[in-house]
Image: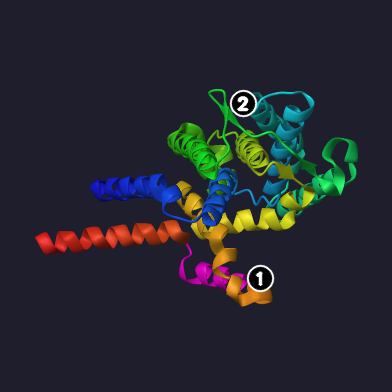
Amino acid sequence: MKLKQCILGSMALAGFAAAPFLISDYNLRILVLALQTAIAVVGLSLAFGWAGLIQLGQAAFIGLGAYGSAIASMQLGLSFWLAMPLAMALSGLVALLIAVPMLRLRGHYLALATVGFNVTLEIIAKNWKQMTGGYDGISAIPGVSLFGHEIQTDTGYYFLSLGFLAVVVAFAALLRQSRFGRAMIAVRDDEIASGTSSVPVVRTKVAAFVISSVLAGLSGALYAHYAHFIAPADFDMWRSISILVMVIVGGEMSIIGAVFGAIVLGFAPEWLRFVGDAYLAVFGVAVLLVLIFMPQGIAGLLRKWTRHTSDDKAAAHG
């Protein structure tokens, strides 16, 4: 089984490395955006899949990261490498300030509270023209320079985004194996039992919420410096809902599933372009079918395929 997983992992890495040279420039741009979104999706997977927090405001934290990094680079003259950590810290700080009162809510009440937070930040971005540019957004955002040279190609941003995503995936994998990762899963399964077992329930939920938001801030910073333009519409409620759908389609508790969920749904609008105005209806039906026939998402399908392949080989040798 482990050998099979190593082979699949090697094939996936080879595929990611070769992708920029095998697809069109247009599809490469979509893939870059999907990889950047995948960072926020992995973050939401920590909060939603592991800690059980129904979070519908992830786009707001992506927006905080995007606006924070753009403003720091344009008004303070900071490079991306200095503006990015400040943007991540801003997202984490805001998350920490709202987490304590907000995370005392449960279920759909928490979901509604995060929706309200997302809408509030969107309204602020639209009306604080001196800082955010209002409806017109912020344009001419500087790109990313590496070793003294500005990255000017989609291929360069692809490998930059892939590198950050790889670090985030490794961090999430280590976090899951840690004591804190096990505490998050325990809180999701049963808060009362976790509390009686000396697990700090509130602190665990707050930490999961903050980590998720910091990763969203990183995603937003990468997006701002890649697109060179941001506007409030980029971080609306639809964006938050689509990110939650990516987590569910990929597999709620799967890190790799979150990545594939972001990529698959990132390309979904292109694949469904032929349906025209019926896109949302077709997309909704497709997601419903996934929930019915693939309750564990893409990750569950991959695990089942790997298990069946291993069983077939064992039977053949037996």
Instruction: Residue under label 2, please give it.
Output: 81
Q: Secondary structure beneath disc 2?
A: helix
- Region of the chain picked out in magenta, as a range: 283-295
- 237 sits to left or right of 143: right
**Along the line of sight, which residue is nearer the eye, 111 or 186?**
111
| Visible residue check, residue 302 | yes
Q: Which residue is located at x 47 percent, y 54 percent?
A: 260
Q: Which residue is located at x 39 percent, y 48 percent?
A: 18
Quadrant position of residue 238: bottom right
Instruction: Indicate the quadrant containing the C terminus: top left, top right, bottom left or bottom right.
Output: bottom left
Q: Mark 1–mark 2 contact, CB under 8 Å? A: no
Q: Which residue is located at x 54 percent, y 44 percent?
A: 154
Instruction: Residue under label 1, please give it.
Output: 280
Q: Amino acid at mark 1?
A: Leu
Q: In the current view of this chain or complex, which residue is farthest to the left?
A: 318
**Along the line of sight, which residue is nearer the eye, 158 or 281?**
158
**Residue 287 belongs to the span the image colors magenta:** yes
Query: Residue 47: image x %, image y %?
Result: 59, 44
